Amino acid sequence: MSGTFDLASTEAEDALRLVRQTTGRRFSTGLVLGSGLGALADMVENRIEIPFTDLPGFPASGVSGHAGTLIAGDLSGLPVVLYSGRSHFYEQEDASVMRRPIALMKALGCETLVLTNSAGSLHPEMGPGSAMLITDHINFSGSNPLFREPTDRRFVGLTEAYDKNLRDLFDEIAKREAITLHHGVYMWFSGPSFETPAEINMARIVGADAVGMSTVPEAILARFFDMRVVAVSAITNLAAGMTGQELSHDETKENAPKAADKLKKLIAGVLEELAKT
Ligand code: HPA
């Protein structure tokens, strides 16, 4: 089992042992919460919380609105591991900062990963508070979490990075719950500065529907670890140059909760269906 825990090292094994000993169980599904989406963690029952600072080798997240906690428990009847507060490429100039956390989920038994984020929209009709299912992504960061991976496993296929069956399930739940769930291509910019209007024009031309500073590295890592992945964005703003207003992280934190209820219902519904299979 520990063979599947990537980056085998004393630290990695210590982190795995700590979570196993503290929780005493295995898990089936991992979740990563985006900026301002911490409320999604409220859905987890029988929760055990472990701060990232207690987990050897885990990145310390310093972004406000991101707590940096592993939460283990049950959601819609499924045993889940959730990260409230991810680390970003722009914090350490390292796209692989989430490699160990994702590897830990896999080692704990998670075969499915649900990613959430806050994002800027390129469509006026998909405004703040909207939910967008990510159908595909564009990596515009110039980086990759698999840089320096020495094995041929680094050549990960991303033709269908975001699992079609899981996406269909999100659509089914959205329909059932009467939630408008947009579909779109998420373009990863490195951050931490926001984009310029010219960059947003480019993003539109190359086929993006939303922009953000996360998720793509975790999705690539999940595919690397052979997990199926699905990702959904909470739209917090229209992208740079679309409103005449400057963008801010405060706006992200303020508006993310407006989409959180939709994301909560969608994720709870999807996990409930998965629990039946
Ligand atoms: N750009 C990049 N990241 C974001 C945005 C944005 O407009 N909104 C929330 N996260």
Image (cartoon, rainbow, N blue to C red):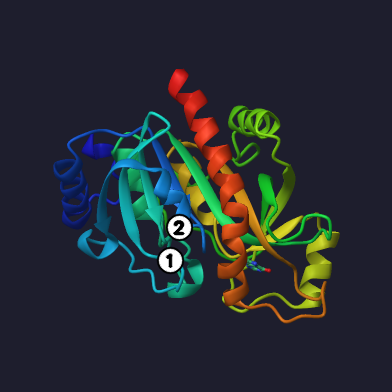
SS state under label 1: loop
Image x and y of residue 36, in percent: 52, 63
Q: Is residue 15 left or right of residue 156?
A: left
Q: Residues within 10 Å of mark 2 (few under 14, many from 20)?
A: some
Can you tell me which quadrant of the image ligand 1 is in? bottom right
User: Can residue 151 be seen in this snapshot?
Assistant: no
Vertically, is 171 above or below 223?
Answer: above
Image x and y of residue 5, in percent: 28, 43
State yes or no: discs 2 and 1 in contact (Cβ < 8 Å): yes
Residue labelled with disc 2: 38
**Which residue is more in the foreground, 140 or 25?**
25
SS state under label 2: helix
What type is the residue that disc 1 sits on? His
Whether label 1 lies within 8 Å of ligand 1 gets the answer no
Q: CA distance from mark 2 to mark 1?
A: 7 Å
What's the mark number on residue 66?
1
Image x and y of residue 106, in percent: 35, 39
Image x and y of residue 74, in percent: 34, 36
The outermost residue toward the top is 277
User: Can residue 169 be seen in this snapshot?
Assistant: yes
Q: Quadrant of residue 239?
A: bottom right
